[in-house]
Amino acid sequence: MKVVHLWMAFLLFAGAVACALAQDAVPGPAQRQLREVYRELVEINTTDSAGSCTEAAQAMGARLRGAGFPAADVQVLIPPGAPKKGNLVARLRGTGAKRPLLLLAHIDVVEAKREDWKRDPFKLVEEEGHFYARGAADDKAMAAIFVASLMRFRSENYRPERDLVLALTCDEEIIPSAYNGVEYLLKHHRALLDADLALNEGGGGQFDKSGRRVRLSIQAGEKVFQSYRLEVTNPGGHSAQPRPDNALYDLARGLARLGDFEFPAKLLPVTRASFARMSTILTGPVAADMKAALAQPPDAAAMARLSRNPAYNAQLRSTCVATMAEAGHATNALPQRAQAVVNCRVLPGESVDEVKSTLQRVLGNERITVTPMGDAVLSPPAPLDESILGPVEAIAAEMWPGVPLVPTLSAGATDSRFLSNAGIPAYGISGLFSEAESSGVHGLDERLPVRSLYEGNEFLQRLIKSLAGGR
């Protein structure tokens, strides 16, 4: 009898597992709705060269109005002189007991040439457990999740304690841009974006090569983006009669000195928190070096070893690197002008003016002029307190037990910098996990694991409700 009972229990268990697997294999109504929103958004070309953010914003606005949102709460705002650079701002009204929560995602994407891709970059293709398309990960997954979430909240008659403000914006991928959506909206429609805090891209999860979740990141700050144009001018002359003051050589020698230069290391609070968490995840020399770097004072040898890794180095110091160069006007003439672009990523709290002065000193040639390209947008780190960390950690622990939450400082630039500079703390947190190898973001065959889209949707909906309260 015991054998029979065990066998029956096994059959029941196996049936339950099979049922669960079948349910996972067939998306439910909420997942199907998300996928349809995602497909529509991905398949609207929003590149700068040939696409239209306005078309995408209007399509998402139509989705929200179709879900019952009043037309007055769904606005497409287009900067004058830029008919294809439209932005969507929509609002799910709450009780007003707390200040709003802003949900930000950009809908523009990096260029993608069809002849370089294995698949059409502007058709959503699901293959072998992945979604392929330009914007599949950056950032139309998060944009689609936010749209589908508001549609679902509306159908549930969910009334939060805060207004939920959705902003889908253009030109995040172009730096600098005269039509950046967040910058434009803050300048001309500030009241629409006013919020207590914001959720944005920048933080996600990572799988290892075996598909195991390694960590979930929350971005609480980012480095300040500032580029400089370097220029040397010269009377030039005939190439048959070289002269010692060659504009191209002057610039090249200065760039070589810059290549050998390293800004001093500095541990910000967010970097300390990141190293503290990562030192418990990693093993071996790297973990030991992170722990030694957290000592007071930091171990100089450990800091030097960590700095050899480009990713860790970017967390520890401001960086400036040459990215473009141009010189001369004819093959048989001495160059009259030599130019280069140096892109700097400055640690929050450090002076951009001091970085410029450092550049001039390191270049070591007064004939090299250094001119800022646009104005830097300062980006103070958002506070990492329990009001944000608590809900994120609690939901992550429910969905992915044992996966640590790691605060990060982004070496890249997102539109969070405009919000932080305007006094709206912005956090990069998506719950979207990517793979250890390249996901093709900004490159070829961009992809996102299918399960990441659906799990990210569940994570963000729970987080939004936790932060917004209400019923």
Image (cartoon, rainbow, N blue to C red):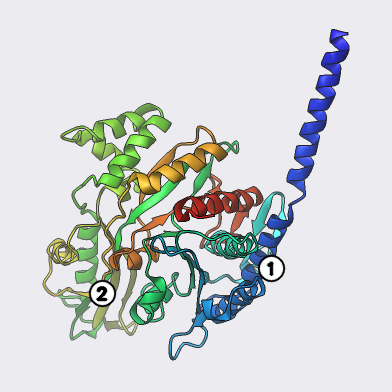
Mark 2: secondary structure: loop
| Position in image of residue 431 (x %, y %) | 52, 49
Residue 450 left/right relative to 141: right
Circle 1 sits in a helix, a strand or a loop, which is it?
loop
Image spot of residue 199 (x, y percent): 44, 58
Residue 370 in view here: yes
- 68 relative position to 364: left or right: right
Q: Nearer the viewer, residue 63 or 251?
A: 63
Q: Callout 2, which amino acid?
A: Asp
Measured from the top left, where is residue 105 in percent x and y? Answer: 49, 65
Residue 50 visible, this angle: no
Image coordinates for residue 245, horizontal then vertical, percent: 15, 75
Q: Residues within 10 Å of mark 1 (few under 14, many from 20)?
A: some
Q: Indicate whether 443 appears above or below 233.
A: above
Quarter occupied by the C terminus: bottom right
- Check disc 2 and report the residue beneath it: 375
Residue at (43, 40) in percent of width and height: 405
Residue situated furthest bottom in the rendering: 81
When the figure is inspected, residue 180 is found, relative to residue 307, above or below; the finding is below
Q: Which residue is mark 1?
A: 123
Q: Given the current orientation, which residue lies at the most extreme top position?
A: 1
